[in-house]
Image (tube, rainbow, N blue to C red):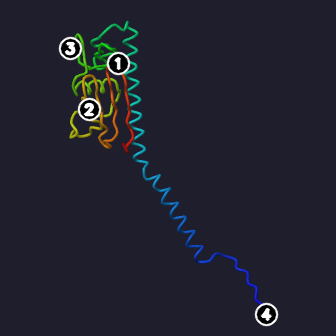
Amino acid sequence: MTRNTVSSGFTLIEMVVVIIVLAILAIIAASKFINLGQDAEIASVQATGGAFKGGITLANVKWVSLGASGPADNLQVFHNDSNGQLDINLWGFPAQSYPPFESSPRLNNSNDCMSVWRTVLQDAPQVSNSANTPDAEYLATYIVPDQCRYLYLPEQTMSIYYDSRDGNVITDSDPNS
């Protein structure tokens, strides 16, 4: 006599294999969600860089609309007071924001970098030329003549670069670089 038995169900080994596969998938999926904070920081730097680029372009367009002929001192670009004035360099891009007259303004120190940042960006993220400044989100550094880098302090591999010779704004928001 032969006995025919039909098994309906999973063996213990099959169940363990399924649980292991599900655990591996859960770990992979969880790692995608764990980086949401970093994704938010990347988006913030990219948005700030885009707004900064827009402000630089707006200042250049204002300069062009007024005749585009050499440096312009205390050009009213934003607001209706001295807080919205920019000194435009000979190439037509913001170089600084200081009320005293200067015949040929140039971006030539970290204070100039900070003044352009604060004037171009309305409600700008806090910028400083010292990494130890409380509440500072960006560190303004003067690189070489007419160029600045704004380092994002919470994630120091991300930054915004500005070249006042051609108005170029580059947002480096790759935390792995």
Tell me if label 3 and label 2 are in contact, CB under 8 Å. no
Specify the label residue 79 is tagged with: 1
Q: Secondary structure at mark 3?
A: loop
- Distance CA(mark 3)–CA(mark 2): 22 Å
Q: Residue 85 location in percent, x, y?
A: 30, 17
Q: Residue 61 location in percent, x, y?
A: 40, 15
- Distance CA(mark 1)–CA(mark 4): 99 Å
Specify the label residue 1 is tagged with: 4
N-term-proximal mark, 1 vs 4: 4
Amino acid at circle 3:
Pro
Q: Quadrant of the N terminus?
A: bottom right
Q: Where is 7 relative to 2, above or below?
A: above
Q: Which residue is mark 3?
A: 100
N-term-proximal mark, 4 vs 2: 4
- Distance CA(mark 1)–CA(mark 2): 23 Å
- Distance CA(mark 3)–CA(mark 4): 110 Å
Q: Residue 2 location in percent, x, y?
A: 77, 90
Q: Which residue is mark 2?
A: 140
Amino acid at circle 2:
Ala
Front residue of this view, candidates 82 and 24: 24
Q: Nearer the viewer, mark 1 or mark 4?
A: 4
Q: Secondary structure at mark 4?
A: loop
Q: Where is 175 relative to 149, above or below?
A: below
Q: Secondary structure at mark 2?
A: strand
Label tally? 4
N-term-proximal mark, 3 vs 4: 4
Amino acid at circle 4:
Met
Q: Quadrant of the C terminus?
A: top left
Which corner quadrant of the image does residue 110 belong to?
A: top left
Q: Residue 108 location in percent, x, y?
A: 22, 22
Q: Nearer the viewer, mark 3 or mark 4?
A: 4
Tell me if label 1 and label 2 are in contact, CB under 8 Å. no
